[in-house]
Amino acid sequence: MEIRTRRGRPHIPEIRVEKKEEEEEQPLSPAARLFHAPEFNCNIISVVGLKSKIKPAVIIDGIKQTLIRHPRFSCKLVESGNNQRREQKWVQTKVVAEDHVVIPKIDMHNIENANADAFLDSYVSDLTTIPLDTSKPLWEVHLLDLRTSDAENVAILKIHHSVGDGMSLMSLVLACTRKTSNPDELPSLPNQKSSLSGSRSYSRLFWLVMALWSVAMLVLNTVCDALEFIATTMFLKDTETPIKGNFRLSTSKRMCCVHRTVSFDDLKLIKNAMQMTVNDVILGVSQAGLSQYLKRRYGEQEEPMPKGIRLRAALLDLADIMENGSNCTWGNWIGYIIFPFSISLCDDPLEHLRRAKFIIDRKKNSFEALLTFIVGNFILKSFGVQRAANILKRALSNTTMSFSNMVGPIEEISFYGHPVTYMAPSVYGHPHALTMHFQSYMNKMTVSLTVDPTVISDPHRLCDDWEESLRSIKAAVQEKSCTH
């Protein structure tokens, strides 16, 4: 999740047609090689709901004009050598767009409403068990002539994580869309307002004291976070709760992907009333939802929910990798932040918001994400991909879940002429039984869950608990406003 919101807004690049000669063959970056290690064979999968029936020929023609003109989408992975000295590089190849577009035959006669939603969940889950064909560029687009409860048809994008991180790919996908109101314009993203405010009438001595205090706290917080990350890598484990998986098993297991769309206006109402950020609200609601879900799971096992549960999430802090102009950098630039959720049943629902904000404010005043990014790259370059993969897998396995949030367009967009109703991206292949991703779009927020069904067999109930927690927190905020 993007903690520093100024970075959480992907830049929309122009897709350049020309390809440099030296780009015809390029070695994989250390981070890209990491995503091909058996411990981290990660893929990004995004479900896009459309308001109109799909016209495959139009989408294929659009792909030819956009996606395959990007070097990473026109390169295939080539490996040589043995396990001791294996070389991996991107090699330019001729791309046949039709080979990357899958149009399954769906019998709609026996599929209606809820059955269509279940069919979509099953279809996406099946995709998590099928590896991408390495003889061609590592991406696919699936076009489903399937009417669900919230879309007329559905497109699914599956892209290997080595191609780029979430913000890189979101930037590229947005470059393939246009405003529905003006097909010639790129989507508009919300402006990120600085949270810095206050009077300048204080004395210089006051500002000097505050600056020194901020620097001291920044250093202290960074040292504490670094020590916690080291301890997590070595021995500090989360509590064995009903949502914590065991990833000593094969990473090629089937994952279940579901989503739920809620009102973004509700989140903004809470944000404004509590004087928080949207990220603060999302984390607070998620903390409340997880607490309710765990209460139910422990109740089903006829056990009381233990106190002092240690449940931490690896929050993804994405660097600003898409800069303006032609000097943009593409790739995987990810730092991790370990966020401790306070799992408890609070009489006051707003307490979850206050606790989440307290923790996130402290995390903002730390270089934890930058430090994990620098140390991760050092380990990759110094000790190799396999050792780095083992270290990172151990660290993530000792936490419970992954968490991320990304800002989307504020106006309706179209995907190659097809108006979009929602976007639900997520990732799988890393050692967590639960991944929560939040994607804003227009006045909606889509919650995407990717779960190990052997650990969380009822992900829709977790969505229900998250949505119910949002409603209870909204009601508490409105009640609080009425009493003041």
Image (tube, helix red, strand yellow):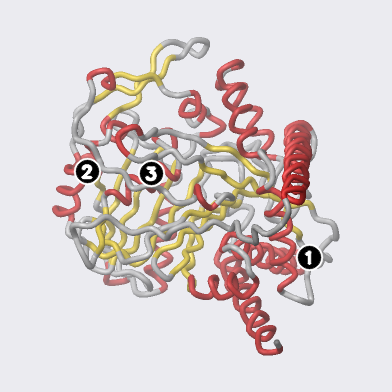
Secondary structure of residue under mark 1: loop
Q: Are marks 2 and 1 in contact (CB under 8 Å)?
A: no
Can residue 153 be seen? yes
| Depth check, front residue: 183 or 325 | 325
Residue 87 image point, x, y percent: 43, 15
Q: Residue at x 66, y 36 (%)?
A: 248
Q: Name the mark on residue 169.
A: 3
Q: Residue at x 61, y 60 (%)?
A: 197
Residue 229 image point, x, y percent: 73, 36
Judge the density around disc 2: few (<14), some (14-19), many (≥20) Cα neighbours within 10 Å.
Answer: many
Secondary structure of residue under mark 3: helix
- What amino acid does circle 2 point to? Thr
Residue sitting at the far bottom: 482
Q: Which part of the image, by quadrant, shows the C terminus?
A: bottom right
Q: Earlier in the sequence, mark 2 or mark 1?
A: 2
Left or right: 262, with 55 as reference point: right
Q: Label 1: which residue? A: 344
- What amino acid does circle 1 point to? Ser
Secondary structure of residue under mark 2: loop
